[in-house]
Amino acid sequence: MTRPAWWRRFLVRGVFWRQGLHWAVLNVPVWLEPLVIAFWSAFFLLWGPGRRGVMYNLRAIKPRSFALTNFFRTYNVFWNYAWTITDNARLQELRTVPDWEFAGWEHFERLQSLETGAIMLTAHMGSYDLGAQLFGEMKTRTLITVRAPEIDPQTQQFEENLHGRTVGEAVNVSFNTRANDLAFDLLEAAGRGDIIAIQGDRVTAGVSPFRSTLFGKPADLPAGPFALAMAARIPIFPLFIVRRGRRRYQLITCAPIFVERRSRTRDEDLRGAVDQWASELETVIGRAWNQWFMFEPFYGDQRA
Amino acid sequence: MRMIHDCPEAQWLPSRSHFAIFRLASYIRLLTASPSKGVRMALAVDRDQNALENLSISALIFVVTVAYLTALLAQWVPWPAAVVLATALAPAADHIPFFFTGLLALPLWRRITGRPGENNVAANSAGAMTVVLAASLWFVSRPEPIRIVAAAMLALFALNAAAAVLMWLVQARVRELEARCGA
C-alpha cells in the first residue's frame, strides 16, 4: 500500500520526528532533558515492529530471560537510542560534544599511524557522527563513512543537508545507494590511504551477505568490508562507540583483523575474518546489549 | 567547544555545571582531587555537562510538578486519583509549554526585535524556572500540605542564590584551578 507523502512524514522513519528532535534540542531546557527523553522513549514503544525486533534479538542475547524482563530491556534500548540521537542532534545544531573514554587505545594509535588505508568496522551502536567528530578532531587523515540510506526520501534529504553542514573536511559521508560504484570509490580511497568506516552488523538490500553465527544463531553479515580489505590489502579494525552515561561515550578499538588470500576459494579466505568479527561483535553486544540499536531481527525467519 | 585531554580531575571543573549549588559542589570536589596520569580521555567544557546535576534537577522538577498538579486536581477528584493523573500528566506538562514558546512566542519576539538565531534554550530555561518559582510562591501561601513542598523548593532557590554569591567570591581561585587542568 502506497501512502501519500504528507502521511509518510509521520511514520516512525519519517522526517517529522527528525525535525522534531532538532527542534527540541533548540528549545527544551537541558535540565528537563531526562524527563523529556523518558517520556518519548515510552511513546516510541508503541512502534510495534521496532519493539518486537529488539525483543526478538534479546531472546538470543539473553536466552534465559522472561518476556516481561526483555520488554523493560527494550525500553532501556529505546532510552539509550533517544539519548544517542539527541547527542547527535546537539552536535549538529550546537556543536556540543560529549566526553570520551578510550579502550584499546594501543589499537587506535596503530590505526592512526598506519601508512596504508584501513577499514573501521562498526556496529549500530553509539553515533556515527559523534565518532566522526572525534576523529575529525584528531585530524590525522580523511575518514570516509559509508552508511545505508534512509528509507524515507525526505528523511534522506534532511540527513544529507545536515551532514553537508556539520562534518568537516576530514570526514566524507557516502550513502550506500550505488553498491557497485561505491565499491570502486572505496577501493580507490583505500589506495590513497584513507580510513573507511562501514557498519558491519546488518545486511541491507543490495549488499552481499556472508553467513556466520551470532549468539548461537545463524546470522548474515555484510561480505563487502572483508572483500574490500582483501582486495586493497588493508586491515580491518573493529571499532565500537558505547554510551557510558549522559553525554559520555567510550570508543572501543579492537585488535586488527587481516584478510589474506591463502586458499583457492574466496569464501574460505573470508570465513576466518568474518567469524573473528562476529566474535568481537558478540563480546561487545553481550556487554552492552542496551546499546545495540538493531530494530530488525538479526536471525531466523523474521529477518527483513 | 573546548576539550581537555587526559585529565580525569577535569570532570570536577565548576564550569561543567549549570546551577550554582552544583558549581560549588564541583569546586569543593576539585579542591580535594589528586592529579591522575596515564588515563586516556577527552572531557568537554560545557556548563551542561554534569550528569548528576542534570538527572537530579530533572527528577526534582518532575516530583514538584506531580505535587503541584496533585494539589490542583485534588480539588475535583479524590487525592489518590489525583496523584495518578498528575504523574501521567507531569512529563507532558513540563515540556508542552515549549511548543508554544518555541513555535510562536520566541519567533514572534525575534521578528519584532530583528534578532537572528534559532536557539531558544536559554530563554526557555529562564522562563521555565521563573514559572516554577512563581508556582512555588503561590503554593507556599496555600493552607494545604503542599505548602511544605513549595517552601522546600523556595529554600532550594535561596540556597542556589547563596551558592552563586560564594562562587562569585572564589572566582579567582576557580579560574586558577581550571587553568591547571588546561581549561
Image: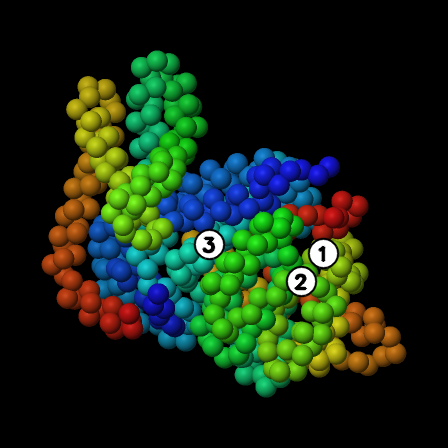
Helix, strand or loop for disc 2: loop
Helix, strand or loop for disc 1: loop
| Looking at the image, residue A57 lies above or below residue A193 | above
Distance between mark 2 and mark 1 Cα atoms: 10 Å
| Residue B118 appears in the rendering | yes
Distance between mark 1 and mark 3 Cα atoms: 25 Å
Residue at 75% in and 61% down? A207
The image shows residue B15 at horizontal and vertical percentages of 27, 60
**Could you tell which of marks 2 and 3 lies nearer the N-terminus?**
3
**For the residues bearing labels 2 and 1, Cβ distance under 8 angstroms:** yes
Which disc, if any, is residue A204?
Answer: 1
Residue at 16% in and 66% down? B173
Which residue type carries mark 1? Answer: Thr
The image shows residue A106 at horizontal and vertical percentages of 53, 77
The image shows residue B166 at horizontal and vertical percentages of 14, 54
Image position of A148 (left or right of B105) = right
**Could you tell which of marks 1 and 3 lies nearer the N-terminus?**
3
Residue at 54% in and 83% down? A113
- Mark 3, residue position: A89
Which residue type carries mark 2? Answer: Asn
Which residue type carries mark 3? Answer: Ala
Q: Of the residues tagged 2 and 1, which is closer to the observer?
A: 2
| Residue A62 appears in the rendering | no
- Mark 2, residue position: A176
| Looking at the image, residue B148 lies above or below residue A178 | above
The image shows residue A173 at horizontal and vertical percentages of 57, 66
Q: Chain of mark 3?
A: A
